[in-house]
Amino acid sequence: TIYTASIKMMVLDRIISKCQSEGRKLLVYSQFTTMLDVVQDALDLVGTSYLRHDGSTALARRAYDINLFNSGHAPQSVYLLSTRAGALGI
């Protein structure tokens, strides 16, 4: 699977599992949106819900997702963020 093909993905899976079991949220940053695509595929594979923010995320969507995630009412416990989108609404 995608998790066993990469040590980084195996570690990420453990971190996500631990955070979810403790009721904590997790921010995953990457400079490369292609890496976020890989992480997104892995999360889809195991059924983990997430939010994603990159340069292609519409301004209104960004604000909504950030407020939802910070409110504590989001069903998503993982937020994928592009570091290159930092000046675009975070």
Image (tube, rainbow, N blue to C red):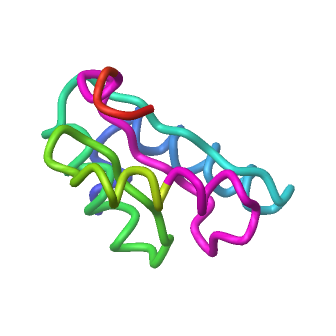
Name the image quarter holding the C terminus.
Answer: top left
- Report x, y in % for residue 13: 53, 51
Residue 48 higher or lower than 61, as above or below? below
At x 37%, y 51%, the residue is 62
Nearer to us in this view, 63 or 51? 63
At x 37%, y 34%, the residue is 89
- Report x, y in % for residue 66: 52, 50
Nearer to us in this view, 72 or 77? 72
Name the image quarter holding the N terminus.
Answer: bottom left
At x 40%, y 46%, the residue is 80
Residue 74 located within the stretch drawn in magenta: yes
Describe residue 16's horizontal placement relative to residue 64 as left or right.
right
- The number of numbered discs placed on residues in the rendered structure image is 0
Describe residue 6's horizontal placement relative to residue 18 as left or right.
left
Residue 81 higher or lower than 4, as above or below? above
Q: What is the magenta range?
A: 66-86
- Report x, y in % for residue 35: 22, 38
- Report x, y in % for residue 5: 27, 46
Q: Residue furthest front?
A: 60
Q: Residue furthest right?
A: 22
